[in-house]
Amino acid sequence: QVQLVESGGGLVQPGGSLRLSCAASGSIFSINAMGWYRQAPGKQRELVAVITSSSTNYADSVKGRFTASRDNGKNTMYLQMDSLKPEDTAVYYCNADIFTGWGKPRGYWGQGTPVTVSS
């Protein structure tokens, strides 16, 4: 059993900052790519940032404002969000490509954490 749990969402004013966390737990042998996604009301889920073993890539809309990082020893990923805008309002989800030691690696999703940017 593998679980991803996000935390750190909330209400913040435009221009403010939030730091999201995503902790993976359970039967984990190894974690490959990890990513942050978001889904705004009435819109499709979109990729925000993805961290692989060799690179970190961001959506154009968040470049220069968001920073994704991971602590492999803790199986945890972070998303530092600065200079937040109202259009960043969404439910933020983490996704991880995890190998449990059995079968093939597969993607797992967290339950999401809401972020609201409003004055």
Image (cartoon, helix red, strand yellow):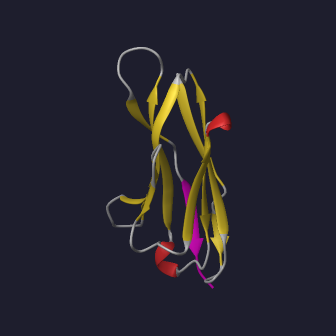
Say which of 29 and 89 sits in front: 29
Main secondary structure type of the part rendered in magenta? strand
Q: How far across and down, in percent of the image, does residue 2 sit?
A: 53, 27
> Measuring 66% from the left and 61% from the top, which residue is drawn there?
19
Q: Is residue 100 above or below residue 86?
A: above
Q: Furthest-front residue in view?
A: 54
Q: Is residue 96 above or below residue 59?
A: above
Q: How far across and down, in percent of the image, does residue 85 sit?
A: 53, 80
Where, by quadrant of the figure, is residue 28 drawn? top right
Say which of 102 and 94 sits in front: 102
> Measuring 52% from the left and 75% from the top, which residue is drawn there?
64
Look at the image and tell me whether residue 80 can be seen.
Answer: yes
> Measuring 52% from the left and 50% from the top, which residue is drawn there?
112
Q: How far across and down, in percent of the image, does residue 48 sit?
A: 43, 61
Q: How far across and down, in percent of the image, does residue 91 sit?
A: 49, 59
Q: Which residues are magenta?
A: 113-119
> Measuring 45% from the left and 46% from the top, which residue is drawn there?
52
Q: Furthest-left residue in view?
A: 44
